[in-house]
Amino acid sequence: MPKINGNEIKIGNVLEHNGGLWSAVKVDHVKPGKGGAFAQVELRNLRNGSKLNERFRSADKVERVRLEQKDQQFLYETDGMLVFMDMETFEQIELSADILGDRRPFLQDGMTVQIEYYEAEALNATVPQKVTCKIVETEPVVKGQTAANSFKPAILDNGVKVMVPPFVGQDEMIVVNTETMEYSERA
C-alpha cells in the first residue's frame, strides 16, 4: 500500500491509522505563525463510525488504502439486513441496513448501489446521487406566491422531509440529491 505525506491527505481518502481503517471527512491545512505547517484531519472509522481528530505534519507518513468499488443491485430487506446481488457473478451478500446511514430511506427495489470493499469486507455503500421520489404531503400551490427562495416543507413517499419550491404540488415526482438531502428538480 502506498504511503503518503501528512500534507497530501484529501477528503475521502481512506487511511490505515492506529490499527484501523479511517476515512478523511474534513481536512484543514494550518500554517501557524510559529512552527511548521500541519493538516488538521477529522477521521471517521469505517468499521464502527467513531470519529477522531488528528494532526499530521508534512513529514508524517500515513498508509493510504485503496478500496475496491463494485456496483451491486439491491434485491430486498430481511430482519434489518439488506440483500445485494453482484451483477457480474450473481452472488448475493447480506449487509446491515446501518451501512447506508441516513441515506437508507432512498434505497429502492432494483437500485444499483456502489459498495466499497477492503479485501472481502464491505465497509461502505452509497446510493446514487440523484433519486426520484413522490411527494405524499405538502401545502397546496398558492397562486401568485413567487417570492424568490421561498420554500415549503414536503414529505416524500419514503418518509423523508425536504423543502420544495412553492410551485411543486402533492403527488408530483421530484428528484432529490441524496448527498445534500435537498430538492433538485421536477422529475
Image: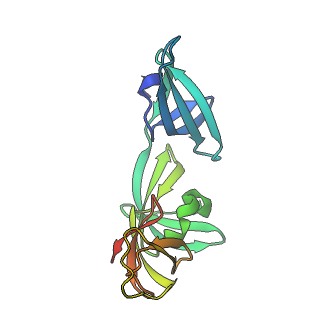
Q: Is residue 27 above or below residue 148?
A: above
Q: How many marks?
A: 0
Q: Looking at the picture, how far across and down is residue 116, in whole percent? A: 46, 50
Report whether residue 94 is seen.
no
Q: Residue at x 50, y 43 (%)?
A: 118
Q: Nearer the viewer, residue 23 or 19?
A: 23
Q: Quadrant of residue 20?
A: top right
Q: Which colour scheme appears in the figure?
A: rainbow
Q: Looking at the picture, how far across and down is residue 52, in whole percent? A: 63, 36
Q: Quadrant of residue 133?
A: bottom left
Viewport quadrant of the N terminus: top left
Q: Looking at the picture, how far across and down is residue 25, in whole percent? A: 51, 41
Q: Residue at x 49, y 13 (%)?
A: 36
Q: Is residue 96 above or below residue 68?
A: below
Q: Residue at x 43, y 34 (%)?
A: 10
Q: Nearer the viewer, residue 141 or 18?
A: 141
Q: Nearer the viewer, residue 33 or 65?
A: 33
Residue extending furthest toward the top: 35
Q: Is residue 4 above or below residue 84?
A: above
Q: Looking at the picture, how far across and down is residue 12, in whole percent? A: 45, 41
Q: Residue at x 40, y 68 (%)?
A: 149
Report whether residue 121 is seen.
yes
Viewport quadrant of the C terminus: bottom left
